[in-house]
Image: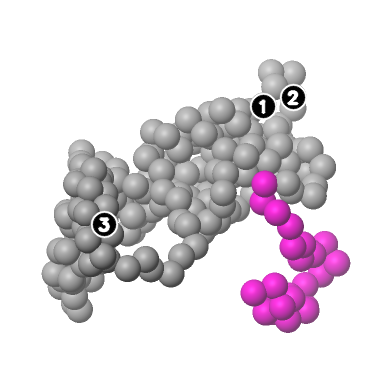
Amino acid sequence: MFDIARKRAADLTSRERLVLADAHHLPFADREFALVVALGVIPWLRSAPLAVAEMARVLRPGGYLILNADNSRRLALLLDPRHAPALAPARLAAKSLLHSAGMLRPTAEQAAVSAHRMAEFDRILNAAGLELQRRSTFGFGPFTMFGLPVASGRFAIRLNARLQRLADQGVPGVRSAGAQYLVLARAPVPADTFLPAAGREPPGELFSRG
């Protein structure tokens, strides 16, 4: 990925540079950036709180952070008994019985992907000293039942679009059920800090829909 990015960035100006680093220990000075974007990052990290704290550290006062987390209460998981959180104890007990009976073989280890409840992720951002500006969920499906698809093709696309419209309208139960939780946060501005007018408005394009 880094090699591909380096080739595509060959024509960048001298102000841009590529850096390969650990998100838990960013090699940048405090308050170095006005904007940090971390999309598709948090679910793959071992410690979301540590990484968010690092992102907050490198933000200037009034700087913005745009990031997302996998929503552990997304609708697609709640509807499938194989993934519904309420049935987790039953699934664990069934797996233990099958292992004991020799009917279930260990599977190859997969990369762990973490998911968060929205309130839990909000607490992580608040603990890092960030101010939440805008929040939304997006993406519905694919819907399955015991791992088998129950909606596909054009119907699945229409269903996703319909649910997304309801979520954007703030319909309770739907607005918090998207697969991804997208957040715009800001580093606080001390009372005695001058902030240029051009830097006061949040980058809202990612949070507006037609």
Residue 81: x, y in percent?
17, 55
Characterize the magenta stretch by its predominant secondary structure. Answer: loop
The residue tagged with tag 2: helix, strand or loop?
Answer: loop
For disc 3, the marked residue is: 100
Question: Along the polypeptide, which appears first: circle 2 or circle 3?
Answer: 3
- The image shows residue 103, relative to residue 21, as above or below, that is below
Question: Along the polypeptide, which appears first: circle 3 or circle 1?
Answer: 3
Bin the neighbour count of mark 3 within 10 Å (Cα to Cα): few under 14, some 14-19, many 20 and up. Answer: few
| Viewer-closest of 93 and 9 | 93
Q: CA distance from mark 2 to mark 3?
A: 64 Å
Look at the image and tell me whether residue 75 can be seen: no
* 46 horizontally vs 144: left or right: right
Amino acid, disc 1: Val
Indicate which disc residue 189 carries: 1
The residue tagged with tag 1: helix, strand or loop?
Answer: loop
- The magenta-colored residue range is 1-24
Q: Residue furthest top?
A: 191
